[in-house]
Image (cartoon, coloured by chain):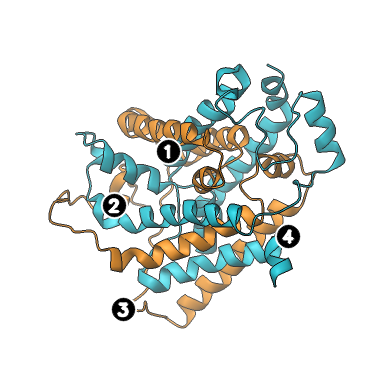
């Protein structure tokens, strides 16, 4: 058990635990699994405005904020108590790619070459941290959901509109990584 | 077919935030589910920028396995909930609000796909990355909130 807690968890364990959150939230109190709406609730709570998109009773959706706080806490626990002791295992081709892009930190979950306060002042770091963050917020709200809301919750409820959304963001990710990301990483 | 032109209908228009109180006791269970989710995010390396890179370049099966298994478990669960008309722990009938299609789901998903590639995170993992000690990601969250606010501000002008 202790050894299992310390190694990186395989995909089927992670997939099962994430999938089971869907019925748990429904059975607890009819809550639909989805994370990007938390961004909207935080905006509604922190920036009182006349913009109609943020004028609703956010306190009724407060469970979503508790859920997000739990995620942060869970990550703190996992990292500090049962963290994966070995560096992240990457495929040889990925390691070769990173060498080409002068990304030297291939041992942690995120490379410090791109995701640190120092990197924020480089062009590629700014694009990954700030532009990336902006597009995640803008895009998921425009799309009405993200990986959890569309690809898992929406598809499990057989919503064809979630299939359209999932295909759109997966295909964009594949094409963007193939054709545009290499240029950004070389900036 | 009725088309909802206002996607914000998802949440109650009742703006009476003062009288609604926040109950810690009522919400603590969601904190616990979140903690489990956060642990899975880190332990299965789902919050890793490298794992997303390897997913989008088809170098590794890992992320496809995670999302595929989660979808399978969720689909079977939702099917069983509907088939046996299960109720919530408070005895209420379970209703899942259907998602209404609008063109924004395509435009928004394309923008999100780019953001996911760049940051290596969808909204959930952004929070978990901060918890895992990558403090610079607070800047990403700030920009994600700014992006959300810009969407809300521009919503009526954008094609839906």
Q: Position of residue B78 (x, y in %)?
A: 50, 71
Q: Is residue A62 visible?
A: yes
Relative to B105, does residue B93 appear above or below in the rendering? below
**Residue that carries the numbered disc 4 in the rendered image:** A7
User: Judging from the image, what is the letter of the chain drawn in cyan?
Assistant: A
CA distance separating discs 3 and 2? 21 Å
Relative to B37, does residue B129 appear above or below in the rendering? above
CA distance separating discs 3 and 4? 38 Å
Q: Nearer the viewer, residue A6 or B26?
A: A6
Q: In front of the other: label 4 or label 1?
A: 4
Q: Specify whether B30 is left or right of B59.
A: left
**Pointers 2 and 4 within a single chain:** no
**Residue that carries the numbered disc 2 in the rendered image:** B11
Where disc 4 sits, the SS reads: loop
First in residue order: circle 3 vs circle 2 = 2
CA distance separating discs 4 and 1? 37 Å
CA distance separating discs 1 and 2? 15 Å
**Residue that carries the numbered disc 3 in the rendered image:** B90
First in residue order: circle 4 vs circle 1 = 4
**Residue that carries the numbered disc 1 in the rendered image:** A142
């Amino acid at each position: 058990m202790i050894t299992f807690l310390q190694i990186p968890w395989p995909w089927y364990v992670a997939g099962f635990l994430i999938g089971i959150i869907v019925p748990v939230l429904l059975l607890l109190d009819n809550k639909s699994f989805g994370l990007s709406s938390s961004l909207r609730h935080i905006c509604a709570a922190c920036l009182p405005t006349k913009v109609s998109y943020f004028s609703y009773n956010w306190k009724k959706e407060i469970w979503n904020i508790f859920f997000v706080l739990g995620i942060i806490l869970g990550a703190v626990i996992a990292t500090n108590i049962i963290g994966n002791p070995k560096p992240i295992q990457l495929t040889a081709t990925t390691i070769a790619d990173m060498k080409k892009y002068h990304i030297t930190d291939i041992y942690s979950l995120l490379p410090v070459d791109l995701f640190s306060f120092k990197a924020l002042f480089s062009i590629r770091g700014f694009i990954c941290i700030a532009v990336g963050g902006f597009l995640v917020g803008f895009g998921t709200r425009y799309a009405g959901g993200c990986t959890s809301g569309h690809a898992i919750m929406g598809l499990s409820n057989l919503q064809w509109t979630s299939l359209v959304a999932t295909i759109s963001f997966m295909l964009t990710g594949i094409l963007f990584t193939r054709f545009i990301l290499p240029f950004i990483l070389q900036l | 077919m009725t088309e909802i032109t206002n996607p914000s209908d998802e949440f109650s228009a009742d703006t009476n935030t003062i009288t609604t109180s926040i109950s810690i006791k009522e919400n603590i269970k969601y904190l616990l589910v979140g903690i489990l989710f956060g642990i899975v995010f880190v332990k299965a390396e789902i919050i890793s920028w490298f794992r997303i890179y390897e997913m989008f370049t088809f170098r590794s099966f890992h992320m496809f396995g995670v999302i595929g298994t989660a979808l399978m478990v969720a689909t079977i669960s939702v099917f069983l909930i509907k088939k046996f008309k299960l109720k919530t722990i408070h005895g209420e009938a379970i209703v899942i609000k259907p998602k209404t299609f609008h063109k924004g789901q395509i435009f928004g998903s394309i923008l999100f796909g780019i953001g996911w590639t760049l940051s290596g995170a969808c909204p959930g993992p952004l929070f978990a990355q901060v918890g895992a000690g990558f403090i610079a990601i607070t800047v990403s969250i700030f920009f994600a909130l700014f992006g959300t606010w810009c969407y809300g501000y521009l919503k009526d002008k954008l094609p839906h």
